[in-house]
Image (cartoon, grey):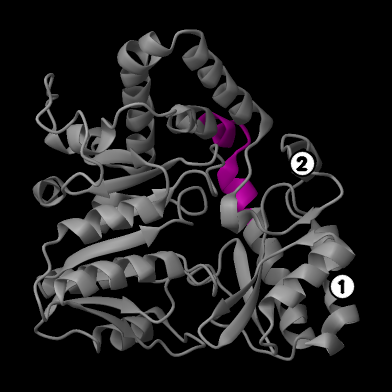
Amino acid sequence: MKTATPLTPVLRQQFLLRSDITYLNFGSFGACPRPIFEKYQQFQLELEQEPVQFIVETGPQYLKTSREALASYINVDADDVVFVVNPSHAVNIVAKSLALQPGDEVLTTSLEYGACDRTWEFYCGKAGANYIKQPIRLPLVSREDFVEQFFKGVTSKTKLVFLSHITSSTALRFPVELVVKEAQKRGLLTFVDGAHAPGQLPLDLTMLGVDFYTGACHKWMMTPKGSSFLFTKKERQSLLEPLVVSWGYKSDHPSHSLFLDYHQTQGTRDFSAFLCIPAALTFMKEYHWDQVSAACRALVIENAPRFFELLNTSPLAPLQDDFILQLCSFKLPTSDAARIKSILFNQFRIEIPVMRHGSDVYLRYSIQAFNSQEDLDKLYQALTVIKGQF
């Protein structure tokens, strides 16, 4: 087996993670390398040294520079992107703004992130609309079969389709390109939750053609926590109301974009995390991140079969880039996710999520640049020891 990228020892030193923990949970909250974290602290120091100048004068220009860097990375117009603290915030903006009517339907899959499910259920409930969770069979067998399964949930009342680019608990890459194309044929709005996508796979949102897309920069792009974005097509921006009404509404000094005014200008807050995107992109370029990610994916896939065998379970999809990237999930024969997670952390010092999705429980490992074969060997040995406790 490979031991990940030859740069692993060098990159391990760039992260601030504790050395006594085997960290296999990058997917939850990411982790920030030293150069990016130092840039973050520089911005925060500048803010504290002269808060007025930073918030009123220099900060907006910093935000513009960062937004332009991100826009170039995901191939969109910089004026079509606004920063938000997390994808949940972005989903709330869209869900609250859609003016759903009684009987309208929002179509999603049965494998979505819990916070997003709750958001849609809340706003659909207020409007008398319905949030439809189309059942998706596991294991997935092909991209085309997924699309066929998903669109069986469309009715004449469907207004928008919402789905993950990469799921959380099951760690599956969905064929959003095919879904968006089919939805457009049917005249449906499209919204992709790409929380795990930026930094894990190349993004071209212009080519994708999606109406709304949210992604987290503080996960696989490695920026500080609280750094995410919402992309909205120009022709859809008038639909979105500000989630927080502040100085950008009926602004005394309006910009060229109501979209930016509504969603970027929100009074006093520390937006330093947003400003670190250029530093993150520089870091990834310096270390040839396409090669690093490829090595991480290889480590994920090469190790997966022995974990499926050990846990007496099957892959949730074919073990290839179409479905599996830098995360992999395994169904566990237990109903007590919290207990297994606690044992792995407290007894074996392994940080790894054990998550409930419906009636199922999944263990998910994430592989980032600092991980090696040794980390997965430790996990395998631990699971061998505790397997009888499932």
Q: Quadrant of residue 39?
A: top right
In the picture, the disc for residue 129 is: none
Q: Determine the residue located farthest toward the front in the rendered image.
A: 126
> Which three-letter amino acid code belongs to the residue tagged 2?
Arg
How far across and down, in percent of the image, does residue 119 sit?
A: 33, 65
> Which three-letter amino acid code belongs to the residue tagged 1?
Ala
The rendered magenta stretch, by its main secondary structure, is classed as helix
Whether residue 292 is in magenta: the answer is yes
Q: Is residue 241 above or below residue 164?
A: above
Q: Residue at x 40, y 86 (%)?
A: 136
Q: Quadrant of residue 294?
A: bottom right
How far across and down, in percent of the image, does residue 81 sit?
A: 27, 40
Q: Is residue 67 above or below residue 292?
A: above
> Rounded to the nearest whole Å, what is the CA distance between mark 1 and mark 2?
22 Å
Highlighted range, magenta:
282-294
Mark 1 — residue?
Answer: 382
Q: Quadrant of residue 256?
A: top left
